[in-house]
Amino acid sequence: MNVLSVGDHGDPSGHRRRLLELDKKDLVEEVIRTWDALAGSEAELGEVRIKVGQLEVENAKIRGVRGVSATKVEMADRIEELEREISVLSVKEGNRSEDDEELARLREKEETLLTALLDLEREFASSR
């Protein structure tokens, strides 16, 4: 056949030669088996893509939980720091107007952080 006279440069594995040697019925069966194998591979690939998507979503959730946890720890640390500053100012002797204003400002900051922390907790709980 002329197809093979070009040499085996385009057919290093010998598939072309093998297919040309098959009779028509065997060739049709080989094509059908190949198509079935290809369809099976495509279906498996689709399943793998779905699994990858699910894992990406799960990974994003984990990152979100870690981010929320880190934020909660930072807020809790800041609240503790404010509480220490408040207790230092409360213990200080003398009731200067400046100290009272500073104490009120720190308590307001503490309250804001506590509220934000509770909001974060509620938002996180509702997202699960």
Image (cartoon, rainbow, N blue to C red):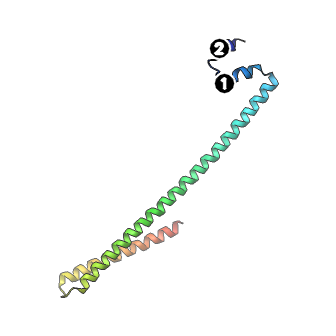
Q: Is residue 109 above or below residue 70?
A: below
Q: Is residue 91 above or below residue 81?
A: below
Locate residue 37 relative to residue 73 in the image: left or right. right
Locate residue 58 relative to residue 38 in the image: left or right. left
Amino acid type shown at disc 2: Gly
Residue at horizontal 54%, vertical 55%?
A: 57
Residue 55's disc number: none
Q: Residues within 10 Å of mark 1 (few under 14, many from 20)?
A: few
Work out how far the residue at label 2 is from the one at label 1, CA to CA, in angstroms: 12 Å
Amino acid type shown at disc 1: Ser
Q: Answer whether labels 2 and 1 touch (C-beta < 8 Å).
A: no
Q: Quadrant of the C terminus?
A: bottom right
Locate residue 19 relative to residue 89 in the image: left or right. right
**Residue at the outermost front position:** 13
Taking depth in this image into account, of 112 and 48 the one nearest to the observer is 48
**Residue at the outermost bottom position:** 94
Residue assigned mark 2: 7
Q: Quadrant of the N terminus?
A: top right
Residue at horizontal 43%, vertical 74%?
A: 118
Residue at horizontal 41%, vertical 72%?
A: 117
Q: Is residue 13 above or below residue 2?
A: below
Residue 41 is situated, as x and y percent measured from the top left of the image, at 67, 40
Q: Earlier in the sequence, mark 2 or mark 1?
A: 2
**Whether residue 17 is visible:** yes
Secondary structure at numbered mark 2: loop
Residue 89 is situated, as x and y percent measured from the top left of the image, at 24, 82
**Residue at the outermost right position:** 25
Residue at horizontal 32%, vertical 79%?
A: 83
Residue assigned mark 1: 13
Secondary structure at numbered mark 1: loop
Residue 119 is situated, as x and y percent measured from the top left of the image, at 43, 71
